[in-house]
Image (tube, rainbow, N blue to C red):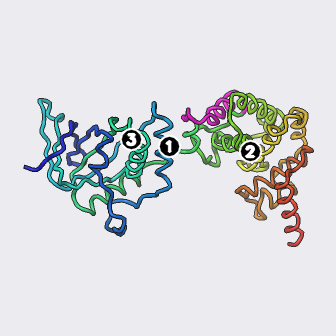
């Protein structure tokens, strides 16, 4: 009889096929799942080629969160002899897999590679476990279809909901806190979606404020003082944007606000992030007095100052970092804030290019 691996498992049924769930020690991973040869063409592989860039990112996640990292199960197909030996409970027993069998990963190749990299740096991981779902191999076509099914129907979490649940990213934590503490933002910020429908009851997404706050912090260390700064900054912004207050006072409708003004657009919120960075970088600026100037800005879509900066010639919004910077330039100039070197150069180029048109 062949030598076998023996794993305690639970047996289940999917699509009239048996599968088995085992808790596999991480030290067994390289023995169970040898790498597929790099020269195998895509049409003869059971899954996509490894994206090497992802591996160190996942490995760092494990090493930096040794006390609370989590991984979902690997899915694998057994090509060779195996046998399920039930216990007194019919669906609980031991799965014997021949050491000569090939076991191919259908889902989780990047997790596997990252685990191996993490173990090379921290051997205390060797005796920890990961769940593996074993299926009977039914040939390359079936393995490829399993990979497609497992990945095609997986729903990517929105950035907003990731930031809503993330407790490791301090800026995400502070963004949630600030939005929840400011009544207007809390009332009109969708905390799950990244894209709002035309008739959404919300005006902003949590991810938009997270991205804006990243621009405010701009590489600086995030501390407890960061949250208090962000709260003070956004409170002053909300207080001084006329249309937001008109909406709160029911003097304007959400439809009117969306269709006729740009002040709910992500590009403007991100531009306000650049303005926030100016105050964080220059504590000598009088934030409250300066932001009062937001009341005087013309936020109408058809205002000349936004044309070709935030608004295309056809009336549609422009996206991208250049548009954010050029929009922030207008706001800075209206508030009497100086442009930094990069902003001044981009402003000059914008004006020069448009004079030539």
Whole-Å distance between the Cαs marked 2 and 1? 32 Å
Let me know if residue 172 is in the magenta part: yes
Place residue 182 in its image quadrant: top right
Place residue 343 in its image quadrant: bottom right
The quarter in which the C terminus is drawn is bottom right
Q: Are marks 3 and 1 in contact (CB under 8 Å)?
A: no
Q: Which residue is mark 3?
A: 72
Identify the element where label 1 is drawn.
helix
Instruction: Say which mark, if any, is on residue 269.
Output: 2
Residue 338 screen position, x and y as percent: 90, 47
Q: Residues within 10 Å of mark 2 (few under 14, many from 20)?
A: many
Let me know if residue 73 is in the magenta part: no
Q: Is 51 rendered above or below residue 287?
A: below
Nearer the camera: disc 2 or disc 1: 1
> Is tag 3's residue or tag 1's residue first in the polypeptide sequence?
1
Q: Which residue is mark 1?
A: 60
Q: Is 72 rendered above or below residue 49?
A: above
Q: On the picture, is 308 further left or further right than 50?
A: right
Residue 83 screen position, x and y as percent: 13, 45
Q: On the picture, is 263 further left or further right than 114?
A: right
Q: Toward the viewer: 227 or 52?
A: 52
> Is tag 2's residue or tag 1's residue first in the polypeptide sequence?
1
First to last magenta residue range: 164-184
Q: Residues within 10 Å of mark 3 (few under 14, many from 20)?
A: few
Q: Is residue 190 visible?
A: yes
Identify the element where label 3 is drawn.
loop
Whole-Å distance between the Cαs marked 3 and 2? 35 Å
Q: Is 139 rendered above or below residue 260?
A: below
Q: Is 132 rendered above or below residue 107?
A: above
Q: Which residue is depicted at the point 35% across and 69% down?
A: 41
Q: Are marks 2 and 1 in contact (CB under 8 Å)?
A: no
Residue 212 screen position, x and y as percent: 71, 43
């Amino acid at each position: 009889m062949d030598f076998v691996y023996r794993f305690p498992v639970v047996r289940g049924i999917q699509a009239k096929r048996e599968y088995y769930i085992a808790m596999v020690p991480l030290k067994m991973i390289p023995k169970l799942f040898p790498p597929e040869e790099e020269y195998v063409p895509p049409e003869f592989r059971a899954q996509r080629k490894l994206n090497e860039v992802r591996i160190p990112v996942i490995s760092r996640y494990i090493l930096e969160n040794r006390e609370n990292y989590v991984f979902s199960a690997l899915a694998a197909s057994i090509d060779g002899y195996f046998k399920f030996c039930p216990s007194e409970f019919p669906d609980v027993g031991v799965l014997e897999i021949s050491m000569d069998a090939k076991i191919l990963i259908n889902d989780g190749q990047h997790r596997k590679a990252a685990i191996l990299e993490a173990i090379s740096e921290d051997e205390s991981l060797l005796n920890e476990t990961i769940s593996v779902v074993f299926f009977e191999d039914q040939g390359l076509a079936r393995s490829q279809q399993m990979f497609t099914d497992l990945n095609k129907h997986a729903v990517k979490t929105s950035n907003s909901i990731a930031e809503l649940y993330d407790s490791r990213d301090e800026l995400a934590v502070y963004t949630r806190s600030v939005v929840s503490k400011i009544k207007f933002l809390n009332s009109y910020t969708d905390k799950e979606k990244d894209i709002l429908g035309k008739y959404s009851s919300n005006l902003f997404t949590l991810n938009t404020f997270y991205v804006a706050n990243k621009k405010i912090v701009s590489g600086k260390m995030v501390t407890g003082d960061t949250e208090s700064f962000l709260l003070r900054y956004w409170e002053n912004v909300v207080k001084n944007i006329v249309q937001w207050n008109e909406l709160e006072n029911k003097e304007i409708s959400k439809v009117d606000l969306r269709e006729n003004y740009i002040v709910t657009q992500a590009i403007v919120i991100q531009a306000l992030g650049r303005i926030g960075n100016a105050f964080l970088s220059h504590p000598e600026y009088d934030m409250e007095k300066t932001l009062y100037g937001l009341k005087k800005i013309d936020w109408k879509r058809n205002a000349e100052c936004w044309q070709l900066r935030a608004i295309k010639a056809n009336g549609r919004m422009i996206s991208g970092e250049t548009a954010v910077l050029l929009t922030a330039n207008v706001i800075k100039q209206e508030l009497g804030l100086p442009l930094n070197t990069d902003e001044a150069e981009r402003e000059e180029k914008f004006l020069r290019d448009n004079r030539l048109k």
